Amino acid sequence: MLKSIFVVLHTITAAAWFGLGLRLAGQARKVTDLGGDAGAALASDGADSVWQMNLFVVLTLVFSLGAFIAGGHFATYGPVYHTSVTLIILLVVDQLFVIRPGWNALQNAVAGGASLDVDAAESARKRVAIGTGVGHLLWLVMLVLMFWNRYLAAYL
């Protein structure tokens, strides 16, 4: 029962991270396009999304480890699961060390209102876009790995 609760919470938080990340790269582009006070306001709004993404990605890892412990530890799970956990850790690193600092740099670049630092804003926007793209790729690979054993059992 406890494992099922952890799995459901893990799925909800992973989906929330994915959904918030879908709009982030577009929002970063809009921040650089608008500039000025409007760009600064939108960057502030995006910072809330990044904070929520930070929370959801860490909770995804915590709930995954909770399901791992509740489900039987190392004896129960094979290499596919361990690969997925490694990818979740990489996703957390991507979020905390690429996406979050990229958004903070973008927010700082447009914070001056009319005095937009175009090069810094564009560099930060690209960092956010690359970070979310890599994160979504990791997320997709983890999704495939979740069902890999079931797929093999059904077709082999």
Image: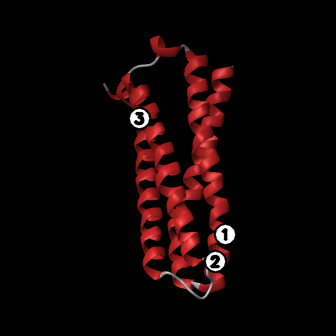
Q: Which mark is residue 85?
A: none
State which tag comes first along the sequence, 3 or 1. Answer: 1
Q: Nearer the viewer, residue 110 or 141?
A: 110
**Up/down of 6 relative to 69, above or below:** below
Viewer-side label of 3, 2? 2
The image position of residue 148, as x and y in percent, is 39, 31
Name the disc covering residue 145, or none: 3
Mark found first going from the N terminus, 3 or 2: 2
Q: Position of residue 51 (x, y in %)?
A: 64, 54
Residue at 67 percent across and 68 percent down: it is 45
From this view, report whether residue 128 is shown above or below residue 18: below
Q: Are marks 2 and 1 in contact (CB under 8 Å)?
A: yes
Q: Secondary structure at mark 2?
A: helix
Give the numbered dot on residue 40. 2
Q: Amino acid at mark 1?
A: Ser
Q: Nearer the viewer, residue 78 or 153?
A: 78
Residue of label 1: 44
Identity, as a three-letter code, of the amino acid under mark 3 = Leu
Report x, y in % for residue 119. 42, 78
How packed mark 3 is, by other alpha carbons closer than 10 Å (few <14, some 14-19, many 20 or more), is some
| Residue that protrudes farthest toward the left in the picture | 156
For the point 46% across and 11% down, the residue is 75
Q: Quadrant of the C terminus?
A: top left
Q: State the image coordinates of residue 80 (x, y, percent, origin top left).
A: 39, 27
Q: Neighbour class for label 2 at 10 Å: few (<14), some, many (≥20)?
A: many
Q: Report the Cα–Cα distance between label 3 and label 2.
A: 39 Å
> Against 16, is 130 above or below?
below
- Distance between the alpha carbons at the discs numbered 3 and 1: 36 Å
Residue 136 seen:
yes
Decide: few, some or many residues near mark 1? Use Cα within 10 Å; few <14, some 14-19, many ≥20. Answer: many
Quarter of the picture containing the N terminus is top right
